[in-house]
Each structure stands twice: as C-alpha cells, then as structure tokens.
Amino acid sequence: MTFRRYMVLAGVAFFAATGDGLIARGMKQVGNVSLHHLADIFLVVLNPVIALGVLFLLVFFTCYMTALSWADLTYVLPATSVSYVVLTLIAKFGLHENVSLTRWLGILLISAGVGFVTQGPAFTPPKEKSGDLVAAPLPARMEP
Amino acid sequence: MKSLYAWGAIAVIVLTSTAGDVLLSRGMKQVGDVGELTRRIGVLAVLARVLKNPNFLLGVLAMATAFYSLLFGLSWGDLSLVVPASTSLTFITNAVAARIFLHERVDQRRWMAALLVAGGVVLLAV
C-alpha cells in the first residue's frame, strides 16, 4: 500500500460521508416522498443541495472504483468505514440530530473494525498466479 | 409505521448494494489496476474499458436501485440511523458474498472487522 492508495481510501471515506450528509439535508428540505407520487423521487435531484450531494457521491464512486481495482472488497469496505465517524459528526453538528451515547459507542466499535482490517493484507492474489507460492509450503507443513 | 418503512428501505438497500458491490468489484478486477492502466493507456481508454464491462454496468444498476431506496429511507428516518444501519449491515452480507462469489480470503481479521461493524450498527439503531 502506497501513500497515494491511502489517499484514495481517504477520498472514499470523506466523499461518501459528505455526499450522504448533503443529500440528507436536501431531503429534509424536500420533505416526505409519498408512495402515491413515485415520480417525485426522480425530481429531487433538481434541489441544489441534493445536486451537490450527487456530485460528491460521483467523486466517491470514482475513488471507490479505483480502490476496488487493486484491493479486495472485504478490505476496502471496512477500511473506509471511518466515514461513519465523519457522518456522525455531520449529523450532530450539521443537521443537529440527536446522537446518543449508545450511538457514539456504535461508532467506537466501527472504528475498532477499521483498525482490525487495515492491519491485514489488502488483496487476495488470484489462485492461478499464486499457485506455486501456495503449493511450496505444503511439504514443509507435512513434516513431523 | 414510519420506522417500519425506514427498516423496509434498509432491507432493500442492503440486498441491492451487496449485489452492486460484488458486481463492481468483479468488474474492476477484470479491468485491472486503474492507476497503472492510466499511466500506460490514458484516462479515456481506461474509462472506455470500465464502461464496456458488463459486470460494472450491472453493478451500477444495482447501486442506482440502492441509491433511490436510500432517498426513500432518508425521507422516512434519521440520517444517523438509515445510512449507518443499511450501509454497515452490508459488511456482513458482503463478507459472505465476497467469499462465495469473489473467492476473497475472508480471514479472522476480516470477519472480526465485519462483526465489530455489525455490533456498531446494532448500537446505532438502539
């Protein structure tokens, strides 16, 4: 993992959280979408705050696709879940939602999960390429 | 009733975004390391290669479904419930799906990470 790759992962976390935050703020402005007026859900992107949120999510998507081109899905997702910490801060200070102590504890557990996964390898090598490497230690293991 | 709608939306988001994540991951692995490819063949050629990948396109379709379900969910529930609950629950379904469909080595460390995040989700929803 290079510095550049860590920056891509940071980009995934940052733009996911801020994009979701902007869309949530926009949806609160738009109000409830009724099941009887389903077409309205496609018009909400005309709201400027939601439009900006969509733009941020596009940047997130580019970073996410870049990360998935060189890292496992089960590495990228937990590694970038630091976005929940950012999201909670936005919910608390940007949207003035009530964030209880239990929710903060939840954020703490998620952060611990991030710590676990980032200490391991980022990528599972394809079987055909790693075949020789995997086969090599086997005889050694069979020795008494 | 409103929270029932919110949890219904969360269930749809989890299923569609798991399918989307798996398809996108498979598609991007087929495309190859984007950074290295960009240096070799240029941004536009990489973009064309990504956009021509069927797994990528199916993944985007699944993600779009998840996105619009998210918009419904956000209009029915709090941001700090709907987003962490739905997106984090996909950690468990993604770990299972990545092991089965992508043949990723989901070792103890990755399971631990998935479970910690799932535990965090339960606390977020209380």
Image: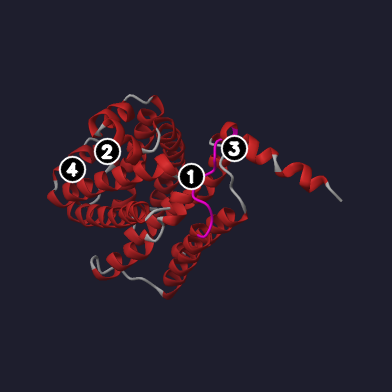
Query: Dot 1, crowdedness within 10 Å: few (<14), some or many (≥20)?
Result: many
Instruction: Using the image, name the chain to which the residue with label 3 belongs.
Output: A
Q: Look at 19% across and 53% down and name the residue there.
A: A26
| Residue annotated with mark 3 | A130
Earlier-in-chain disc, 3 versus 1: 1
In the image, are marks 3 and 1 on the same chain? yes
Find numbered disc 3 in the image and state the secondary structure of the residue it sits on: helix
Q: Nearer the viewer, mark 1 or mark 4?
A: 1
Find numbered disc 4 in the image and state the secondary structure of the residue it sits on: helix
CA gap, disc 2 and disc 4 = 19 Å
Earlier-in-chain disc, 1 versus 4: 4
Q: Nearer the viewer, mark 2 or mark 4?
A: 4
| Residue annotated with mark 4 | A45
Instruction: Using the image, name the chain to which the residue with label 2 belongs.
Output: A
Q: Look at 19% across and 44% down and name the residue there.
A: A44
Q: Which residues are magenta?
A: A119-127
Q: Nearer the viewer, mark 3 or mark 2?
A: 3
Q: Amino acid at mark 2?
A: His
CA gap, disc 4 and disc 3 = 46 Å
Q: Main secondary structure of the magenta part?
A: loop
Question: Can you give x and y, in whole percent of width and height, for residue B50 in the image?
Answer: 33, 30
Is residue A122 part of the magenta span, yes or no?
yes
Please tell me in which quadrant of the rendered image residue A71 appears. Answer: top left
| Residue annotated with mark 1 | A72
Q: Amino acid at mark 3?
A: Ser
Asked if residue A33 can be seen in this view, the reply is no
Contact, CB < 8 Å: mark 4 with mark 3? no
